[in-house]
Amino acid sequence: MTSAPRAPSDRKGLVQVFTGDGKGKTSAALGVILRALGHDFRVCIIHFMKGNFPYGEQKILTSLPNVTLAVFGRLSFVDPNNPAEEDKEEARKALGAGRKAVLSGEYDLVVLDEVNVASAWGLVGVDEVVKLIEDKPEHVEIILTGRYADKRLIELADLATEMTSIKHPFDKGIEARAGLDY
Amino acid sequence: MTSAPRAPSDRKGLVQVFTGDGKGKTSAALGVILRALGHDFRVCIIHFMKGNFPYGEQKILTSLPNVTLAVFGRLSFVDPNNPAEEDKEEARKALGAGRKAVLSGEYDLVVLDEVNVASAWGLVGVDEVVKLIEDKPEHVEIILTGRYADKRLIELADLATEMTSIKHPFDKGIEARAGLDY
């Protein structure tokens, strides 16, 4: 089994959006990361909301080469109607870290986990996310996850998938489970 | 960071379905696998269609402990309207391997990748997939991926997500890319 050449400079990175109310958005981003690592891509993941932080996979990801992980946000839930200044500050830091990673040239794939929610709730401006995408170096692939993706982000994306919940165990009162949901 | 206990016998395994025409079904299953491995789950992945075989992630997955990977199907595409006997034979073998894995007690999570398509195209009977789900030990989690999930499978599932393509780079003539699509 051979790998693709590492960070081929002539590769065109795309923009992928995983949105919708169904389970599988962050999971799909993680799956793409696994695939990318198998081809020796250098990957950076920025988690905008610690409350959604994928503890299970952190253990595996941090054991692998070529992965950088950065986590922002507070453990408490954000009030969408009245986000605290600290929540905005954390989201701004997350976007700054994402911008740095994208522009650094050190990564082939940058995942901005829950950035769609952060911008929908006004923690960061959609304009700034748009600008980050517009400024990205040609070879960098960006994945944006989270519900409520702004239509401007979907317009800019090359690929967008809406994950729609047909049924969810939470509907039956089953709580989030270690190893499967986090 | 602590892990959940390994294969707790009182854990109730659920059935998850990822279906729809959008990108992210197999990727989401891979993301759940990453999460599960982080909690020391034992994982088995059965790929029903080699044509869809995720070469990039195989390299990472086979480097990790607690993962078994089995690949079935022929490299050539299956004709949905007139599948070859060899395609049916491969799908039957895949389902047999999945059944063995589920009933063995050796795995906490079994992913049947593209089984939805295999049953929709008549390579295996939906009845047999239903029976496998009905016969599963309590603690085993099963994930079924692929387009065209039969409504009986969705009825049996605890969680089902429809991945709908909003836009896809293939629409623009961009071909599948190493590290991102395989």
Image: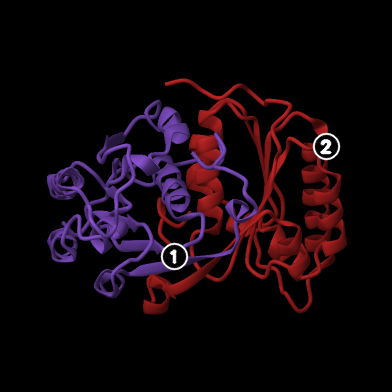
Chain colours: A purple, B red
Image coords of residue A150 (percent x, y)? 28, 70
Give the numbered dot on residue A20.
1
The N terminus of chain B: image quadrant: top left
Image coords of residue B141 (percent x, y)? 69, 42
Res. B62 in view: no
Q: Identify the residue shown where x is 33% and y is 52%.
A: A114
Res. A177 in view: yes
Q: Residues within 10 Å of mark 2 (few under 14, many from 20)?
A: some
Image coords of residue A143 (percent x, y)? 32, 56
Q: Identify the residue shown where x is 77% and y is 45%.
A: B98
Quadrant in the rendering for residue B32: top right
Image coords of residue A101 (percent x, y)? 18, 44
Q: Which label sits in the foreground, 2 or 1?
A: 1
B59 is higher (above) or lower (below) than B16: above
- The reply to whether discs 2 and 1 touch (Cβ–Cβ < 8 Å) is no
A77 is higher (above) or lower (below) than B88: above
Q: Nearer the viewer, residue B136 or A159?
A: B136
Q: Amino acid at mark 1?
A: Gly
Side of A98 relative to A180 (left or right): left
Which residue matches tag 2? B103
Q: Identify the residue shown where x is 83% and y is 47%.
A: B96
Write down the chain letter for disc 2.
B
Secondary structure category for the residue under label 2: helix
Q: CA distance from mark 2 to mark 1?
A: 34 Å
Secondary structure category for the residue under label 1: loop
Q: Amino acid at mark 2?
A: Leu
